[in-house]
């Protein structure tokens, strides 16, 4: 069976203000890995990889890069240590460019980019909002889907400024973070279902009205 590859790129804020929900973020990410493993079993025609880059004012940290989800281990306190500021543009530019270069001359794939942050840009040096917007606009024409999950700032306004329309606001509490990951994981299942059915996956990522029942979905 020829498999269609889905590259899951997660760009995670590791700035100091994320410390209060550190445990919930670690738990939620590990649950997401399990969800993607379940999706891969549910849709055997899809091969899923995970790339995860965390970021703060000290730089970007590549925790995983195009690793098969079946081989992925859980992250823990030693992997995720919130500190410093929020160079969001640099994190997006670095992560997306790294994956884009990896995918040059490759075909038969989709990319799902998930950006998760509790604050707006405040420390980038290499990329501007304008350059990130152009990058995202270009890639959205080539099977890349971008989502922005945020709290403690005007999420929709900021996301729209860099051409991302798939947004979700979460409450920065343990329960709010847990609820956010549940909703995100359900949307991720629907995304793979749309790929299987050859439907558009660029819009309405978090729209619950799009999440119609599917018999195969009950096994995950």
Image: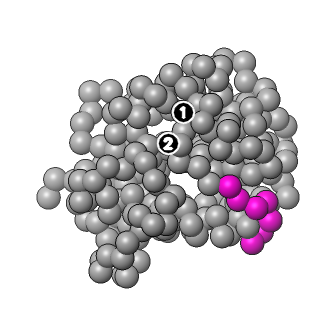
The verdict on residue 49 being magenta is no
Q: Are marks 2 and 1 in contact (CB under 8 Å)?
A: yes
Q: Left or right of 54: which side holds 69?
A: left
The relative height of residue 19 versus residue 209 in the rendered view (above or below) is: above
What residue is at 23 percent from the left and 53 percent from the top?
198
Q: CA distance from mark 2 to mark 1?
A: 9 Å
What residue is at 25 percent from the left and 65 percent from the top?
44
Q: Would you say residue 205 is visible in this rendering?
A: yes
Q: Left or right of 46: which side holds 81?
A: right
The verdict on residue 170 being magenta is yes
Q: Left or right of 20: which side holds 204?
A: left
Write the start and end of the magenta stretch as one range: 169-175
Q: Residue furthest left?
A: 1
What residue is at 51 percent from the left and 58 percent from the top?
206
Name the residue tied to disc 1. Answer: 163
Q: Earlier in the sequence, mark 2 or mark 1?
A: 2
Q: Would you say residue 10 is visible in this rendering?
A: no
| Place of residue 66 in the rendered image (x, y in percent of width and height, measured from the top left) | 43, 44
| Place of residue 2 in the rendered image (x, y in percent of width and height, measured from the top left) | 16, 53
- Of residues 220 and 184, the one nearer the viewer is 184
Name the residue tied to disc 2. Answer: 146
| Place of residue 199 in the rendered image (x, y in percent of width and height, measured from the top left) | 28, 53
């Amino acid at each position: 069976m020829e498999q269609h590859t889905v590259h899951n790129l997660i760009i995670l804020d590791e700035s100091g203000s994320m410390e209060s929900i550190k445990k919930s973020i670690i738990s939620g990410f590990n649950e997401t890995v399990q969800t993607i493993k379940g999706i891969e079993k549910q849709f055997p025609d899809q091969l899923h990889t995970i790339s995860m880059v965390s970021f703060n004012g000290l730089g970007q940290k590549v925790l995983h890069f195009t690793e098969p989800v079946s081989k992925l281990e859980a992250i823990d306190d030693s992997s995720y240590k919130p500190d410093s500021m929020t160079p969001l543009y640099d994190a997006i530019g670095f992560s997306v460019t790294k994956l884009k270069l990896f995918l040059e001359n490759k075909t038969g794939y989709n990319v799902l980019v998930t950006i998760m942050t509790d604050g707006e840009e405040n420390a980038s040096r290499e990329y501007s909002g304008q350059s990130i917007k152009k990058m995202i606009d270009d890639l959205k024409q080539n099977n890349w889907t971008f989502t922005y999950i945020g709290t403690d700032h005007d999420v929709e306004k900021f996301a729209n400024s860099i051409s991302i329309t798939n947004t979700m606001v979460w409450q920065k509490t343990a329960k709010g973070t847990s609820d956010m990951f549940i909703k995100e994981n359900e949307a991720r299942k629907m995304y793979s279902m749309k790929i299987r059915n050859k439907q558009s996956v660029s819009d309405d990522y978090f729209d619950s009205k799009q999440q119609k029942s599917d018999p195969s979905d009950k096994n995950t």
